[in-house]
Image: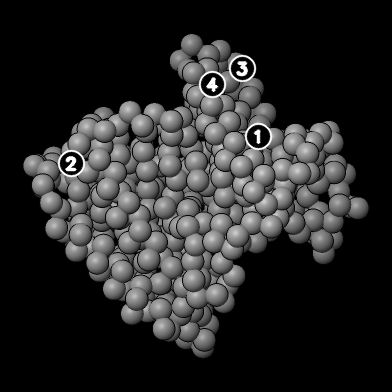
Amino acid sequence: MKIKENLYNQRIISIDALRGITIFVMIFVNELASISDVPQWMKHMPADADAMTFVDVVFPAFLFIVGMSVPFAFNARLLKGDSAKTIWTHTLKRALALIIIGVFMVNAEYGYDASKMIITPVFWALLAYAMPIPIWNKYGKDFPVWLKNTLQYGGMLVLVALYFLYVQDNGEIGMTPKWWGILGLIGWAYLFTVVYYWIVSGNLWAMIAFLVVCVAANSMNLIEGSFVQQTSWLSFIAGHLTHAALVSAGVIISLLFFDRKVAAKINWEVIGFAVLFFATAYLLRPYFGISKIKGTPSWTMFSATICTVLFYFLYWLMEIKKQTKWSNFFMPAAANPLLIYILPGVIYYFCKAVNIHIIPGYFRVGVPGIIWALVFSTIMLFVMKLCNKYKIQLHL
């Protein structure tokens, strides 16, 4: 793979802003999920609703941002002189880490037999959420090597032990992937997309073709009796290509914006793709409906449309108009996305393990609950600011 000479070399602040906003909203809606008596438009739509809310766009937005970052990540490593082996090793480690963390998280939620487990499910979940922090923390150069190794390898041993301490509700020892968890789905989508991106050397037209294949495979996998649905390995791949469609859409938009010598005053190619994403979603809707839970192509392509339009606005506001100060509020999350995603789980299971109630029940219902979710999300941003300051940053 060759270095993309025309790809911007500097950090794109509008991508960071979109990442920060997305993660802030993600923390908000995750906390909101535990609040009762909130409007439907602030919750995931049911599987058969043929509709979506802003909550249903949060996960796709994160996938889209992962895709937007791919060309920059590869180019940076090539410019640094990394070998193909180094890049492949890094890619596989990152995907595997996301998949592993995702599987542990989803098994912490359900599927266990508490009566047969040596440790309580709550304490098991607390360790499962907490161990990625010492394992994947980005330790400074002045951090003692012996302590770093102790924390990392100790954390790995704990995760291995947790696997064998887990007893499924059918009595079997060990975990199952279930639905892989959010991070696991991101890991698979990232893996499929970056492997293809490397093979085609980041060629724009090849990435467009990959997006078409992703949407087609997603559609075939939802057709009852299709050969894709009836072939287990094809169905597995098609299921993950559903989310890879959003990653590849992010790659395409990133290349259209930044793989050029001179920035366009009006990027008609990006506008054209936003229209194309929308038209694809609109045309496929009568056949598959809009459903995040089912993972329909209309959901992915409407989400890609929204993400493209939102990013174009941020690009115009921040890169062209240079209005960037407002984004400082969200940047702590953008700099440490994995930690801010798992930390609420650590807090939740810790409080549950020691039977602490952070807030009274009054703030778990209706408008007070919505306000609390906003307050909690804001607090998490300030916590991330402290974590970033003291070099507690997860780096896959």
Asked if residue 167 is positioned above or below residue 51 in the image, the reply reads above
Instruction: Tell me the mark number nearer the camera, choosing from 3 and 4.
Output: 4
Image spot of residue 319 (x, y percent): 22, 37
Give the residue number, with chain letter if any, for mark 3.
Answer: 147
Upstream in sequence: badge 3 or badge 2: 2
| Identity of the residue drawn at 63% across and 24% down | 151
Give the residue number, with chain letter if any, for mark 4.
Answer: 386
Asked if residue 243 is positioned above or below residue 228 in the image, the reply reads above
| Identity of the residue drawn at 49% across and 62% down | 53
Upstream in sequence: badge 2 or badge 4: 2
Give the residue number, with chain letter if any, for mark 1.
Answer: 131
Q: CA distance from mark 3 to mark 2?
A: 39 Å
Give the residue number, with chain letter if any, for mark 2.
Answer: 7
Asked if labels 2 and 3 touch by Cβ distance under 8 angstroms, the answer is no
Bin the neighbour count of mark 4 within 10 Å (Cα to Cα): few under 14, some 14-19, many 20 and up.
Answer: few
Amino acid identity at mark 4: Leu
| Identity of the residue drawn at 35% across and 73% down | 281
Upstream in sequence: badge 4 or badge 1: 1
Amino acid identity at mark 3: Leu
Classify residue 319 as left or right of residue 247. left
Upstream in sequence: badge 1 or badge 3: 1
Amino acid identity at mark 2: Leu
Upstream in sequence: badge 3 or badge 4: 3
Q: CA distance from mark 1 to mark 3?
A: 15 Å
Bin the neighbour count of mark 2 within 10 Å (Cα to Cα): few under 14, some 14-19, many 20 and up.
Answer: some
Amino acid identity at mark 1: Met
